[in-house]
Image (cartoon, coloured by chain):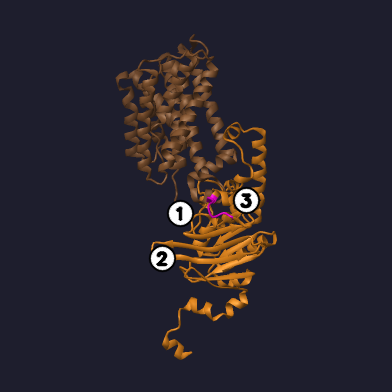
Amino acid sequence: MSLLELAGLTKRFGGVTAVDGLDVAIEAGRIHSIIGPNGAGKTTILNLITGVERPDRGQVLLDGADVTGLRSFERARRGVARTFQNLQVFLNMSALENVMAGCDRLSPVGLLAALARLPRVRRANRAATARALELIDFVGLAEWRDAAAAELPYGALKRLEIARALATGPTLLLLDEPAAGLNARETAAIRDLIQALARTGITVVLVEHDMRLVMGVSDHILVVDQGRRLMVGTAAEVRADPRVIQAYLGTAGAGVTGAA
Amino acid sequence: MAEFLQFTFSGVTVGAIYALVALGFAIIYNASQIINFAQGEFVMLGGMATVVLAAAGLPLPVAIVGAVAIAVAVGLLLERGAVEPARHASVVTLIIITIGASIFLRGVAQVLFGKDFHRLPAFSGDAPIVVGGAMLLPQTLWVLGVTALVVVLLHGFFTRTLFGKAMLATAHNPLAAALVGIDTRRMLAVSFGLAAGLGAIAGILIAPITLTAYDVGIMLGLKGFAAAILGGLGSFPGAIVGGLLLGLAEALTAGYVSSAYKDAIAFVAILAVLFVRPSGLLSLGRSERV
């Protein structure tokens, strides 16, 4: 059974069909990328998977179970985590607290217990702090851990979002343009991080415009165009497919064809 | 000197009450940007429900716990019944809903409890303690002690527990909070429950000193709001400092100038703050970045 399955997923915004009858199955324990020209519906697909948007038609299946009707936080509790193209960090907290907020689902306690800080609440908090510190080290932010999130540089905030997503204990991690705005050195570090994540058994779905990054890390690549599945394949297959080149560069006009 | 001390005592007492009410405003504002104008009614409910339960023969501590529970239940009902269904409306609409709720609650209280003033016995007698020539009521110690305890608990809750962090996370970015597994609707309900509890505690503590009636929530709510604005809306330390400053300013004005101007102080303070430092004395200086 696939970890994630999208069945006939359709989402319209007014007259625009952002995702159009998409069927995709994603196997566990790999790095999958979604690529496509601007406006192809990549971020909308992530929004549909995480419950930020509801589809007009079709289903999202997680481990074979239909989660289409579940809200975002319920899907997060079933192991779906994500980062954002434009950062969504809790700027009113420190770096460490941001990651701790992601640990929330691991230690459900009642309000009264939390107010009184009962021993088990203290234990849960200590455990969350320890876990958050580990994750902050893992993404390479040890030096920033007590800094206010608002003071972190852009590249560090991208890593902080990844650490926070990991804190939820995901089986499926969706990364929306993790390398956007980063320089070559930072991008290489993100690539290493993604590969390290995949080695821990987390299934990664990557939406990214940096083709070197995508081609370098992906086991499978899904190419979408105008909300439809154009093809699925390995990096080599995608690179060689004329349909992909056409989708990116547009349908060749008569003049161009003549020149070619 | 004794006179000054006396005014200070009464200022700090009432200031602590304003601080509790202001904290209630801050908690709901932080969770939702809503200014909950029904906050004063929670204060009224706390005092009145204690009076009624005590009159029904319950021991005072039981009556107090019962009254706080009733106020919390009303707070949760208000959130579920009036705010939650209109969740997608604008913040202004939601604020107007809380104004409507406050009028409704006051009306129900008037029907249930009548229009008379009610008295609650002081928790540990009325024999004043003389300090430096000024009279200190034992109830004042209760007010200050309980307020300090509540502040310490809340501080620990927001800084040291995951639940508290989940609330702060929801306040800052509900979308990201939901996506890390935080049930943001529950957080809004919890904020109303907490604010109602705080308001009720304030109303119970002050009832033995000032008497209570169905409409005490109007003034106490507005004063708490003024304290929250004074300290910086949404700031917890600001709510406490604002409450104490406002209480002191009122008591000193009433003592040295005229008690006729006492209530005007709060509103002059709001105007002054809004002219000079619109974000409040201890505002967080919110920085937005993209």
Q: Which residue is mark 1?
A: B289
Establish if B39 lies above or below A240: above
**Mark nearer the N terminus (2 vs 3):** 2
Shade of chain A as shown in the rendered figure: orange
Amino acid at circle 3 = Ala
Q: Quadrant of residue A30?
A: bottom right
Q: Secondary structure at mark 1?
A: loop
From the viewer's side, name the closer residue of A163 and A120: A120
Few, some or many C-alpha atoms within 10 Å of disc 3 (few <14, some 14-19, many ≥20)? Answer: many
Q: Which residue is mark 2?
A: A16
Amino acid at circle 2 = Val
| Highlighted magenta segment, given as a residue range | A66-72
Mark 1 to mark 2 CA distance (whole Å)? 30 Å
The dot on residue B118 is none
Q: Chain of mark 2?
A: A
User: Which residue appears at 46% of the width and 23% of the height?
Assistant: B46
Q: Which residue is mark 3?
A: A167
Q: Chain of mark 3?
A: A
User: Which residue appears at 55% of the width and 63% of the height?
Assistant: A7
Mark 3 to mark 1 CA distance (whole Å)? 24 Å
Residue B268 position within the rendered picture, expressed as x and y whole percent measured from the top left: 31, 30
